[in-house]
Amino acid sequence: MANKIPRVPVREQDPKVRATNFEEVCYGYNAEEAQLEATRCLNCKNPRCVAACPVSVKIPHFIAQVAAGNFAAAASVIAEDSSLPAICGRVCPQETQCEGSCILGVKGEPVAIGKLERFVADWSRENGGVKPEIAPANGHKIAVIGSGPAGLACASDLAKLGYDVTVFEALHRPGGVLEYGIPEFRLPKDRVVAAEIESVKALGVKIETNVIAGRTVTIDSLLDEEGFAAVFVGSGAGLPKFMGIPGENLNGVFSANEFLTRNNLMKAYRDDYMTPIHAGKKVVVVGGGNVAMDAARTALRLGAETTIVYRRTETELPARREEVHHAKEEGIQFAMLTNPVEIVGDEKGWVKAVRCIRMELGEPDESGRRSPVAVPGSEFEIETETVIMSLGTSPNPLIAKTTSGLETNRRGCLVADENGATTREGVFAGGDAVTGAATVILAMGAGRKAAAAIDEYVKSKSL
């Protein structure tokens, strides 16, 4: 039976080699490996994997095409629901979504859905791509603020429906967190991100960079002066959080956002770029999510001995298991049940150590995780030259502050209903701007829902 075939392992760079470079860690499947893995799919009548996918990719259908060797047909199936398959195949947390719902995973290993999606997307890109159907132009203009995953997904769906879509991006390169937040070794920028953005532009979507919503343009001006029928806000959550402990203003303390932006968007790791970045010989990263893993693995590649400090145990780490596994393989050290209480500086104002305290787990908090409790008298220091705070992010308040009638919640996130409609008529929102920092695929799902709601809204106004 198909489910007796073991999961096909994916080839990767040797850990000792990849820890010294920024080339992609995972090589992905070749055609033979992809077809063999695809034969493991049971093609369930009621596929739980599809229900678990935020953008509802028809997973058994595309996998059946892969098994048959019809890679172009597989790409067409995926393209019906996802505009960024090569990205999703690399960075989505499949283990908690599609693969986490795979029936084969109950007693064994689930189908490697993410690796198959990546294979199909890469094959398609190298063999001419997919040319989706586009409805005739309907004469309506839609503005999309932010070119991250939510904005690109929304723009793609609206363009296919015949809308004239313009995306406004604050940075000098489109892609949002895909460009500035996720390192090259996980998500190649030119070969993958730029190529998938070009596919979105091929639908007729226009992207204007260096446009700051709330300054260069406002939502009011887009709606009232420039003739846009609706606006989608997918500006993400780029405002970093800090602990509020003594010493956070010392030289050598960074947010993970700044550290990764310098390295990813501004290419600090490359000798042909002049972007300054400070790592030093020893780095401490505070936090346990995917961003913390990205920052730690980046610092390691810049030559630093790197330690991740996390106040709970490894069981509670919010990062993907694959990222934790890769970090350990590469030599990242983990200091669990440890929490910083002060950053210690030298006489010149530079970081020299982090003073920490041991923690133990108490009762569960509102998230369901056991709350960490400090152990009295257990303080100790970790010597370091750099501290990177990776404690989550919140949305930039600029858009809300410059738009009348746009409400936010106590966390600074835009208030929107399940379809992305905000408290301001004609303005929709989705992704991290609404939920706070989350995943690429959840942002895409929100963008797609909002696109459908925008279509309904514009049609209702045209009656």
Image (tube, grey):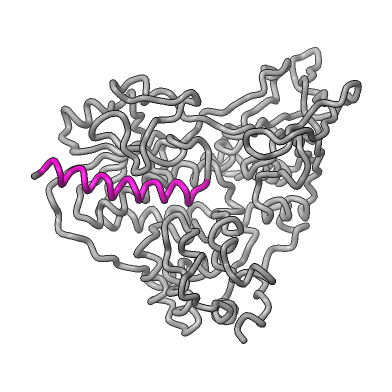
The residue positioned 75% from the left and 47% from the top of the image is 315
Please state if 249 lies on the left or on the right of 86 as rendered.
right
Please state if 141 lies on the left or on the right of 116 as rendered.
left
| Residue 463, quarter of the rendered image | top left
Percent of width and height locating residue 447: 37, 47
The residue positioned 85% from the left and 30% from the top of the image is 358
Percent of width and height locating residue 297: 69, 46
Magenta span has 445? yes
The residue positioned 71% from the left and 51% from the top of the image is 324
Q: From the image, give the main secondary structure of the stretch colored magenta.
A: helix
Percent of width and height locating residue 416: 37, 35
Image position of 90 with respect to 139: above or below: below
Image position of 303 with respect to 389: above or below: below
Percent of width and height locating residue 151: 37, 44
Residue found at the very far right of the displayed protein: 377
The residue positioned 80% from the left and 42% from the top of the image is 334
Image position of 324 with respect to 432: above or below: below
Q: Nearer the viewer, residue 451 or 129?
A: 451
Q: Can residue 76 be seen in this view?
A: yes
- Of the 4 image quadrants, the one containing the N terminus is bottom right
| Residue 12, quarter of the rendered image | bottom right
Magenta span has 444? yes
The stretch of residues the image draws in magenta is 439-462
Residue found at the very far bottom of the displayed protein: 1
Residue found at the very far front of the displayed protein: 363
| Residue 404, quarter of the rendered image | top left
Please state if 404 lies on the left or on the right of 289 as rendered.
left
Please state if 281 lies on the left or on the right of 83 as rendered.
right
